[in-house]
Image: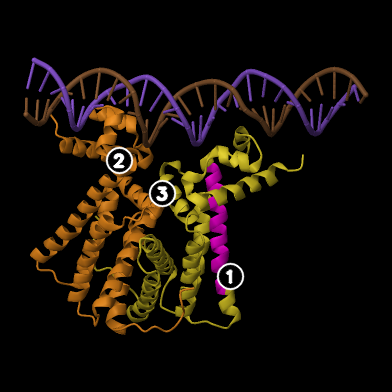
Chain colours: A yellow, B orange, C brown, D purple
Amino acid sequence: MALDKEEMSERVIAIAEDLIEAGGAENLKARTIATQAGIAVGSIYNLFRDIDDLHRAVNMRLLGRLGEAGASAMAELQKAGVTDTRQRLLALARAYAGFVAAHPASWPALLAFNRRQLPHAEPDAYEARLSALLQIIARVLADGSFGLDETRLRIAARTLWSSVHGIVTSGYAANSAGRQADETWEQVELLVAVFIKGLERGGTFDHAGTAPS
Amino acid sequence: MALDKEEMSERVIAIAEDLIEAGGAENLKARTIATQAGIAVGSIYNLFRDIDDLHRAVNMRLLGRLGEAGASAMAELQKAGVTDTRQRLLALARAYAGFVAAHPASWPALLAFNRRQLPHAEPDAYEARLSALLQIIARVLADGSFGLDETRLRIAARTLWSSVHGIVTSGYAANSAGRQADETWEQVELLVAVFIKGLERGGTFDHAGTAPS
DNA sequence: CGGCATCCATGAACAGCGTTCAAAATTCTC
DNA sequence: GAGAATTTTGAACGCTGTTCATGGATGCCG
């Protein structure tokens, strides 16, 4: 035959990616995939256990490309000799915002998919790809020479990441509902600026209190 | 009959709420609702245009309760004579985190639902309920006597909200994947502390550059 | 080259889903 | 109470993901 099993898998993944991008996760239908790939419906289940499994493969690709986008943004800045913490964090945030804007349906699909999978108990590969991103941020913060030890660095990186994530995603949702898109970027700039200033000033952050719940 | 049309609607909404809470949005099935409500499948479509319409009604209730939680948290603090900005923001954040924890399936369902609705073009009621929340935050920030004009106050409030949202939600997703839950709260504390310090220090924030895209 | 075994592609079939709509039942109006 | 108007009903339709007996292709060994 012309196509290896792995080649066919990749082709199906590519088709799935297009379908999700075109109409969200609910547009990922077995019969459509089969038709576009030139195979039978049943054959999909020889390549992937589920449609969810296929969606997971698509998401892996997405996360990989997001990591590449972040890493290449850092590489570009380093080549230009930029070492300013603020500019580096803004570049990372812009890489993320650009990535979300470039995948207006796939990325929300990934987020929804992740949330739906809670009882599935296989956090491995996803979290691995995510922590690669967090380490990029942590490295930038470490170079910023705030007085942060290992633990606080990790927490600060996660905080920054989650915050930018929240701004970009909820900003994106509001954006298509008629609001201006650049307000999102203003928020990111405010967050980064305030974050750096806050870390510079306080140095360490004290635990004055209020328990979780 | 025993039940008015509106009474039946509320009953169906309550059932829908339970179903979503029990198994996510995909557990909201027409036939299950009909059985539990003691009506026929078709009757649901006399009360709601869609199943999505029903889900929207559930989400409205959720957002309303979230607003109440935030407002009552503020009222409690005011009764206790607490005016510290930091404590007030932390109380709001804790109200939100508690709300998400109390609705571990409904809230993710609301988020996914909102993201799916982008081409629907009816941003009215959702955004109205959300901006009520933002105004609570803005009021707290205004009382903090940083030098923020109307516009910057709005942006700062949105930034803070989205950031806490990002931390809590992605923290919650990671939480059920085995990580400790209190790290989420550490992140919230860091964010609030750093935010206040940053606002106190910089006063205004300058636009030094980097365009959106 | 032939016989055999192993594998895999196939698509009809199944259970379940949201949604519709002609008919039945109910309620309203006079 | 008769007739009109409205609402409730559930069988039926088209769609979905998934399965599995069938048939064909491929590889291996003598």
* Main SS of residues in magenta: helix
Q: Which mark is residue A115?
A: 3
Q: Magenta residues, as a range?
A: A53-74
C-alpha separation, residue under disc 2 versus residue under disc 3: 27 Å
Q: Earlier in the sequence, mark 3 or mark 1?
A: 1
**As shown in the figure, which amino acid type bears the numbered disc 1?**
Ser
What residue is pinned by disc 1?
Answer: A72
What residue is pinned by disc 2?
Answer: B49
Of circles 2 and 3, the one toward us is 2
C-alpha separation, residue under disc 2 versus residue under disc 1: 48 Å
Looking at the rendered structure, whether the residues under marks 2 and 1 are on a common chain is answered as no
Q: Which chain does tag 1 point to?
A: A
* Residue closest to the eye, A79 or C23: C23
Which residue corresponds to the image point at 57% horizontal and 41% vertical from the top-left? A32
Q: Which chain does tag 3 point to?
A: A
Image quarter of the N terminus of chain A: top right
The answer to whether residue B115 is seen in the rendering is yes
Q: Position of residue A72 (x, y in %)?
A: 58, 70
* Residue closest to the eye, B146 or B28: B28
Of circles 2 and 1, the one toward us is 2
Residue B94 covered by magenta stretch: no
Which residue corresponds to the image point at 33% horizontal and 49% vertical from the top-left? B110
Image quarter of the C terminus of chain A: bottom left
Please say if C13 is above or below B53.
above
